[in-house]
Amino acid sequence: MASISSSSFLFSTDLFQSRSLKPTSLSWSSSFPNINISTNSITNPSLPSLNKCLVVQAAWTRRSRSEAAKRPSRKSWKQKTDMYMRPFLLNVFFSKRFIHAKVMHRPTSKVISVATTNSKDLRNTLPSLTDHNACRVIGKLIAERSMEADVFAMSYEPRKDERIEGKLGIVLDTIKENGIIFV
């Protein structure tokens, strides 16, 4: 490799001379005449500092076991089948002014029956829209309207840190007393 100049800047005549000369070897380093590469540093494993810059890392890596174990999109068997085993879900909401209850069909998200103290007939007849008597009326209406829609069993899933007592307990007990089975 006599045509390679020792300076970092190469003149154009040196470039043409190096291309016109035939390479003495067929190694990959002979295909780069402008770069000063010695073949001894590649074949000699005793120089680890030179080999570090020549290593090409892969573009992808395998997921670690902890990352592979964390699959938030994967549902359990119970999560997949629960909506078909218990298709009708009761939802009860208590605001400061009203009580709302509805029964939904979980696989299709259709509302089967609705009862609220904000409706015209209950708003004008009930003395209080949030007391225990209003809870009993809502429970009775939900049970009647669900039975008209041929729903005789439903489930209720309490929210986190929610206890089945007080007004919620009254609504659920009234629904049970009127012939609905809780699964």
Image: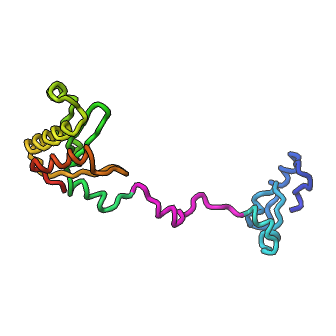
- Whole-percent x, y for residue 25 in the image: 78, 67
Q: Residue at x 22, y 31 (%)?
A: 128
Q: Is residue 182 magenta?
A: no
Q: Residue at x 82, y 54 (%)?
A: 34
State left or right for residue 66 relative to residue 18. Answer: left
Q: Residue at x 37, y 51 (%)?
A: 161
State left or right for residue 48 relative to residue 72. Answer: right
Residue 48, quarter of picture: bottom right
- Whole-percent x, y for residue 181 in the image: 14, 54
Does the magenta stretch mainly form a helix, a strand or a loop?
loop
Q: Residue at x 88, y 57 (%)?
A: 3
- Whole-percent x, y for residue 12 in the image: 86, 45
Query: For the magenta stretch, what is the residue range?
Result: 55-73
Please say if 19 is above or below 171: below
- Whole-percent x, y for residue 119 in the image: 19, 28
Q: Residue furthest right?
A: 6
As rendered, which of 89 and 126 lies closer to the eye? 126
Quadrant housing the C terminus: bottom left
Residue 81, quarter of picture: bottom left
Q: Is residue 66 magenta?
A: yes
Please say if 82 is above or below 27: above
